[in-house]
Amino acid sequence: MSRKRSKPWLHRFSRPLIGAIATVGTINTAYITYLRFTSTSCPTDTCAVLASRYATVFGQPLSLFGMLAYIAMIVFALLPLLINAETQKNLRNRLEDKTWLLLWVGATAMFAFSIYLMSIMFTEFVFGGRSLGLAGVCPFCLFSAILATAMFVLVILGREWEERGTLISIGTVVTLFTFVASLAIYAPPPEVTAGGTVTDTQGRVIFSYDTESGDAETQLAEHLQSTGAVMFGSYRCPHCCDQKALFGQAASPKMPYTECTPGGKDANPEVCQQELLESEKISKQPAGFPTWKIDGKYLTGKQTLQTLASASNYDGPQDFKNASSTRCTAQ
C-alpha cells in the first residue's frame, strides 16, 4: 500500500503567512496615509522622503495605493481558505489555482516597485542628490519593501509550480510594465520658475507654493514678528511649508521662523532642541514640526491663521485669503 506524500510545511502554511505579512503591510501603509491626510506633526528624520514627489501618485498619497495593494494580497491569499475543502473540493481547487496566479502578479509588481523606490531613496536621498545620509532613510518605506520581498519569496516557494516557463514569462512582463509605469509616473518635474520656495543651503528646491498674500496675511506676519512669536520648523517638513503657504509668497518671508535642521538656511538646532524639550515638558506630548511659541505658550502642528491671530492677540484685518487645506508641492 502506497502512502500519500504529505505537503511540505511551507506549502501548507504559505497562504496564512502571506495573509499575515500583507496585514502588517496594510497597517504600516494605513498609518502613513493617516499621517498624510491629517497633517500630523512631521517626524524630523523621514519627512524628506515621505513629503517628496515620490510619495504622491495622481494627487493622492502613494501609501494609500500601497494599502489597497496589501488588502488585495490578503484577499487573494485567504479567500480559498474560506471554502470547505471537504464539501466543495472542486471549487476550492479552482479558486486556489486562480488566486495563486493573482498572488504571483501582485507580489511581482510590489517587489519590482519596491526595488524602484528603494533605488530612488538611496541614490537621491541617502547618498546622492540631497545627500541626507541616515536621515534620508524612511523606516516605513524600508519596512514595506521588506514585507513585499517576503511575500514575493513566499509566493515562489509556497507551492509546487508546474508551468514554470509561463510563470517566468508573466513575471517578466509584470516587472517590465511596473518599471515603465514607474518611470512614466515619476518623470522629472518641470523647473520651478515662480512661487514661494523652500530650499536647502545649496539652493536646491525642496518645496514650492504659489499662494498669494493679502494685507491681512502681511500684517499678521509682521505682528507675530514684532511680538516675539516664533515658528520652529524644518526645511524637510511638508507641514512647515504648508504653514508658510498659508501666509503666501509675499508675507511668509516676514513671519518669524527658526530653522531647526542642519542643512537648512541659517539653522539653529541648539535653540530648537531647548524649545522643543520645553514644549514637551509643558504639554506632556511629543513635540514635532512645526511648533509655534507665542506669548510663552507652545502650539504644535500647522495652525490656521485665525488661531495664530487669536493666540497672539492680533487685532488687525482678518480676511485671510488661503484656506487651511493649502498645501505645498514637493519637488
Image (cartoon, rainbow, N blue to C red):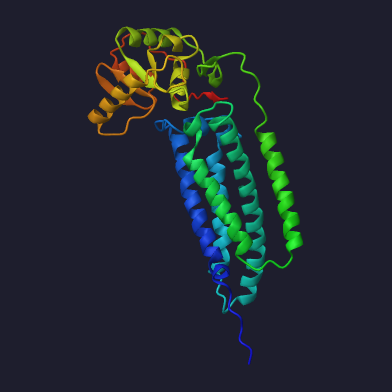
Say which of 13 and 261 sits in front. 261
Tell me: 174 left or right of 217. right
Which corner quadrant of the image does residue 130 belong to? top right
- Quarter containing the C terminus: top right
Mark count: 0
Q: Which residue is situated farthest in the bottom direction here?
A: 1
Q: Position of residue 255 (x, y in %)?
A: 40, 12
Q: In this view, does 263 lie above or below 26?
A: above
Q: Where is residue 140 in the image (x, y as percent from the top left)?
A: 48, 42
Q: Residue at 68% across / 66% down in the picture?
A: 161
Residue 112 visible in the snapshot: yes
Say which of 312 and 7 sits in front. 7
Tell me: 245 left or right of 1. left
Q: Residue at 67% across / 30% down in the picture?
A: 187
Say which of 193 and 308 sits in front. 193
Q: In this view, does 5 lie above or below 287?
A: below
Q: Where is residue 188 in the image (x, y as percent from the top left)?
A: 66, 27
Q: Position of residue 67 (x, y in %)?
A: 53, 47
Q: Residue at 49% across / 49% down in the picture?
A: 26
Q: Is residue 6 above or below residue 61?
A: below
Tell me: 32 left or right of 311. right
Q: Residue at 61% across / 17% down in the picture?
A: 192
- Quarter containing the N terminus: bottom right
Residue 56 visible in the snapshot: no
Q: In this view, does 310 lie above or below 286?
A: above
